[in-house]
Amino acid sequence: MKHILSALSLLCAFSTIFSAEPVDPGANSPDEAKSKSFSSKKAIEFLDNASLSWQKERKCFACHTNYAYLYARPMVEKNSDAEKQVRAFAEELVNTRWKEKGPRWDAEIIATAAALAFNDSQNTGKLSETTRIALDKMWTVQRDDGGWSWLKCAWPPMESDDHYGVTLAVLAVGFAPGDYAKTPQAVKGIEKAKQYFAKNSPEHLHHKAMLLWANTFFPGLITSEEKSKITQELLSRQLPDGGWSGASLGEWKRADKKEQDPKTSDGYGTGFTVYVLRKSGVPENHDAIKKGIDWIKSNQRESGRWFTRSLNRDNKHYLTNVGSAFALMALAECTKHE
């Protein structure tokens, strides 16, 4: 990854050292006021506190909170005290809980392997033994059709369908430093995943965006024509204010029977889209990318987060947590934009 410049260049100076007692960042609210100016310090404080509070209170990992944290945190500062605590919690999951009780779901294996692999790539550039254990365990639960039995809690876009899980497993192998992707089990597993994709077309744009991201590690996963079409479709969903709405990336039904809002930009829609477009090769000086970064820097809330409305029901809005992680990841991929 690139070194962090421009908007993120001061992050290291704002390292937050945590005791055993993180500060609860408070509820994710659409009514929270916007910050008068972008603050990297507030952003990392929010992510640190949200992740540490989650693991302390819930005693688990979640796609929308501490897993996403392990992706974003080292991109803005390596090996912070808070990150070390979250990383240690993930390693304990693999080395202790899985050995004693087993994983709770197959999805936990993939999500943990992906987060640890990405974290390794950012911090040391070397595959840790714990990450290797998690990656190897993925293949023991891969189905004959190349897929995995994913967690379906009706919480899109991450916890709702098998297709997301397969792309995340492929990404986990792509993230892994060294030659893990060349190991026999990985080669066989990726080939089976490709067979799954061949028989299970992406149902919505978020699926396509995940494939676009995975294709950066495994060229040919999608064709050049498909890559161009997905890129253009993502760009076409940009809203007049420069952001993207997470709701515009799929056609998910809400449990609360309310209407989705594809016309309001949010942290996840914008952060995820900008990050994936950048990784797929869209230059940072592209007009859409510059507008997306401007939206991120001008729509941070006072707490440091970027609000994202839940795609399932209007209560906890946990997509805000992962949206805030991707917002920082997007900034890190746009190092020259001021």
Image: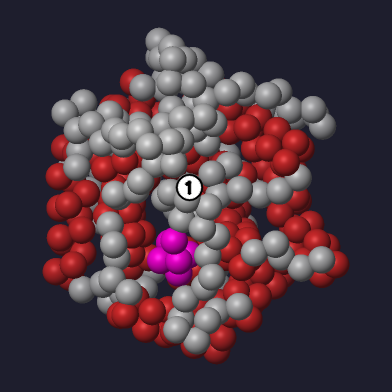
Magenta region includes residue 162: yes
The chief SS type of the magenta part is: helix
Magenta residues, start to end? 161-166
Left or right, 98 with reference to 306: right
**Residue furthest toward the front?**
257
Left or right, 118 with reference to 80: left
Q: Position of residue 237 (x, y in %)?
A: 19, 42
Residue 285 in view (yes/no): no
Measuring 71% from the left and 23% from the top, which residue is drawn there? Answer: 23
Measuring 57% from the left and 23% from the top, which residue is drawn there? Answer: 27
Q: Is residue 301 above or below residue 165?
A: above
Magenta region includes residue 105: no
Q: Is residue 102 above or below residue 25?
A: below
Q: Position of residue 236 (x, y in %)?
A: 15, 45
Q: Quadrant of residue 329?
A: top left
Residue 236 in view (yes/no): yes
Q: Position of residue 141 (x, y in %)?
A: 60, 78
Q: Secondary structure at mark 1?
A: loop
- According to the picture, the residue beneath numbered tag 1 turns out to be 155
* Amino acid on which the number 1 mark rests in the picture: Trp
Q: Quadrant of the C terminus?
A: top left
